Image (tube, rainbow, N blue to C red):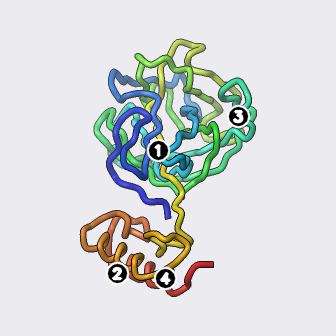
Amino acid sequence: MCRVVASVSLFASFAHADTFLYAAEDGGNSDSSLSQFDANVTWGNTFTVETAPDGSPYDTITTVQLALARNFADGTRSIEILVYDDPDDAAPEFDPARAVLVSRTTTTVIPTPDGEPADYAIAPTTVAGRFFIAVNMDALQGEPVLRQDFFEPGDSSWTFYNPAGTPQLVLGDSLFIGNNIDFGTGTWVVRAVACTADPGCNDADLAEPFGVLDLADVQAFVGAFTTGDPLADLTGDGILDLADVQAFVGAFVAGCP
């Protein structure tokens, strides 16, 4: 299980020994960008996998952070969180024609104050080399939806437009493709929280020696559970309860392969 903590710092930086925040901007100087017509819009940033001090890659995406240009207070606007991989990492740094969709999460907008990012949890998704974190939703003409930092260059940000109601998941086939730096706009406030893959053989293998389930794993789980450590959140729902205990017992009894 990929262990994640709730708090992260801005920019691509270490948030915890197990987590890393991929961000192309610092959240400051952000403003809205309007759609010039009713459209289905996909926007996002490209990143490159970073490595932890022990050499393990931060390659498992668990959460996407997104700031929108307005507060959708009713929480009913549909939105999709997309993760693409670049299979050959060839130049240029990101070519939409090469993008391969590896994760698609359909949800609704999380209401937040204007400009504040919200956390969208996704199924843990593994990427390698370069990858692309994107958001897709319908935007009405003149509606402030996309939020960007105009003081960042935008060379890592991309925008795709298609007719309203018709998302194009194959980015290279989009009717309009633009790299933000080419038309003078900034960097999208679209980020990703990632962690390193755990060395354990299953969710109960929480302590060294990994690959063996023993008393050390029991002690690690009990210690984490009683102190509220996310390490014990085996169900990944943000709550430590009986379901996590049952998950630990089930994994421990199943044993390592």
Front in this rendered view, residue 240 or 66: 240
In primary-sequence order, the first of circles 4 and 3 is: 3
Query: Which callout, 1 or 2, points to the residue nearer the camera?
Result: 1
Residue identifier under label 3: 89
Measure the C-alpha gap from mark 1 to mark 4. 29 Å
In primary-sequence order, the first of circles 2 and 3 is: 3
In primary-sequence order, the first of circles 1 and 2 is: 1
Crowd tier of the residue under label 2, counting other residues whose Cα lies within 10 Å: few below 14, some 14–19, many 20 or above: few
Residue type at numbered disc 1: Pro
Q: How many numbered discs sit on the rendered protein?
A: 4
**Residue 132 in the image: x percent, y percent?**
59, 38
Crowd tier of the residue under label 1, counting other residues whose Cα lies within 10 Å: few below 14, some 14–19, many 20 or above: few
Query: Which callout, 4 or 3, points to the residue nearer the camera?
Result: 4
Contact check, label 4 and label 2, Cβ < 8 Å: no
Q: Is residue 43 visible?
A: no
User: Can you say which quadrant of the picture contains the C terminus?
Assistant: bottom right
Please, what secondary structure does the residue beneath circle 2 have? Answer: helix
Residue type at numbered disc 4: Phe
Give the answer, above or below, for where 67 lies relative to 195: above
Please, what secondary structure does the residue beneath circle 3 have? Answer: loop
Residue identifier under label 1: 53
Crowd tier of the residue under label 3, counting other residues whose Cα lies within 10 Å: few below 14, some 14–19, many 20 or above: some
Measure the C-alpha gap from mark 4 to mark 2. 15 Å
Please, what secondary structure does the residue beneath circle 4 have? Answer: helix
Front in this rendered view, residue 190 or 42: 190
Front in this rendered view, residue 56 or 104: 56
User: At x 62% / y 29%, what residue is drawn?
Assistant: 161
Residue identifier under label 4: 252
Front in this rendered view, residue 250 or 34: 250
